[in-house]
Amino acid sequence: MGVCFVFPGQGSQAVGMGKTLYDRFDAVKTLYAEASETLGYDVAKMSFEGPAEELNKTHVTQPCLLTASVAACLVLREKGIVPAVVAGHSLGEYSALVAAGSIAFRDAVKLVETRGRIMQEAVAPGTGLMAAILGIDRAKLDGICAGVTEGYVGVANYNCPGQTVISGEKAAVEAAMAKAKEAGAKRALPLAVSVPSHCKLMEPAGVRFAEVLSAVPVVDAQVRFVNNVDAKELSAAADIRASLVRQLSQSVLWEDCVKTITAAGITKFVEVGPGKVLGGLIKRIEPAATCLNVEDTDSLDKTLEGLMQL
């Protein structure tokens, strides 16, 4: 039934990402040159050398991570591996849409840089917070968030059974963390992120982003694409645009996305880009799934070998 390419989101970045693919493949060098020309700085140098403090700034992370992910996808296509379906986690949706032929790479890399700046400016520093909640039922956590009176908090990411992320105003998130632990959560961990993503605090950012997105060419997806906010297949350009705006302020339904894909008969996944976060989540959602990854030349060679054996 084919392979699903999944693309990582913010948090998977690391200094050095993409370098071995850059060193081996001319097409990857060309891709990084295009990104650098578009953004006005050396994306390869930033990605390969850092410093980490600069790479971890949202408006830098997003285009650099997208470039590393698209580079890995480009190499897989050169090797004759094409996806039957694509999906991405949060920022990863933009890499997925480049892979699906819906957004041109040059447009996507500039778009996510702007997206990062808009997100950063949407909430005053220190007023928002995100936290990972481990070992609690998602319905129970929904109820906890709804019952918090210290401010606004909501579920940002339904990542897999027993792993959820909440987002919102700092005091409200802290209150929800305490209530979750009282209700039996194994752990409640604040995340080192500067923006409370995927919650209604990002609605003003969504308004600004919609204006920016309206000027960017988006065409119908040429590959099946499963979106974050509905966990449904989308192909029409207008639906994709609306979904990307909603994604800023609505929950990422990653667990549901994976179930949508496996329900269609696809159980082979390749995580395309830095890290192995999504593969770990997928195995918890669908233990029978096969999960491979491509982030460097070693993992590329292993994945190509692994796909030949399937």
Image (spheres, rainbow, N blue to C red):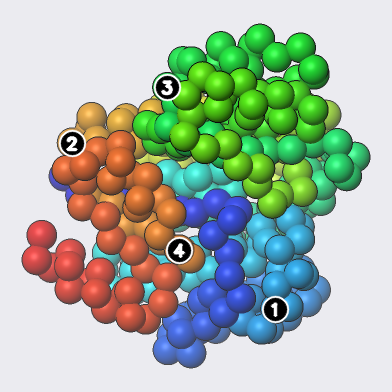
Picture residue at 41% right of the left edge, 50% below the top: 278
Name the disc covering residue 275, or none: 4
Between the residue at mark 3 and the residue at mark 4, the CA separation in whole angstroms equals 26 Å
Q: Earlier in the sequence, mark 1 or mark 3?
A: 1
Q: Position of residue 187 (x, y in %)?
A: 52, 37
* Residue 104 or residue 198, whichever sits in front: 198
Picture residue at 66% right of the left edge, 9% below the top: 147
Residue designated by label 3: 137
Residue designated by label 1: 50
- Of the residues shown, which amino acid type is indicated by label 4? Gly
Between the residue at mark 4 and the residue at mark 1, the CA separation in whole angstroms equals 17 Å
Picture residue at 60% right of the left edge, 42% below the top: 189
- Of the residues shown, which amino acid type is indicated by label 3? Asp
Which type of secondary structure does the marked residue at label 4 adopt? loop
Q: Nearer the viewer, mark 2 or mark 1?
A: 1
Q: Are marks 2 and 1 in contact (CB under 8 Å)?
A: no
In the rendered image, the quadrant that contains the N terminus is top left
Looking at the image, can residue 102 be seen? no
The single residue placed furthest to the front in the displayed view is 182
Q: Nearer the viewer, mark 2 or mark 4?
A: 4
**Pointer 2: residues within 10 angstroms few (<14), some, or many (20+)?**
few
- Of the residues shown, which amino acid type is indicated by label 1? Gly
Q: Position of residue 308 (x, y in %)?
A: 13, 68
* Residue 226 or residue 201, whichever sits in front: 201
Q: Nearer the viewer, mark 3 or mark 2?
A: 3
Q: Earlier in the sequence, mark 4 or mark 1?
A: 1
State the image quarter where residue 281 is shown. Answer: top left
Q: Is residue 63 left or right of residue 87?
A: right
Picture residue at 33% right of the left edge, 74% below the top: 299
Residue designated by label 2: 265
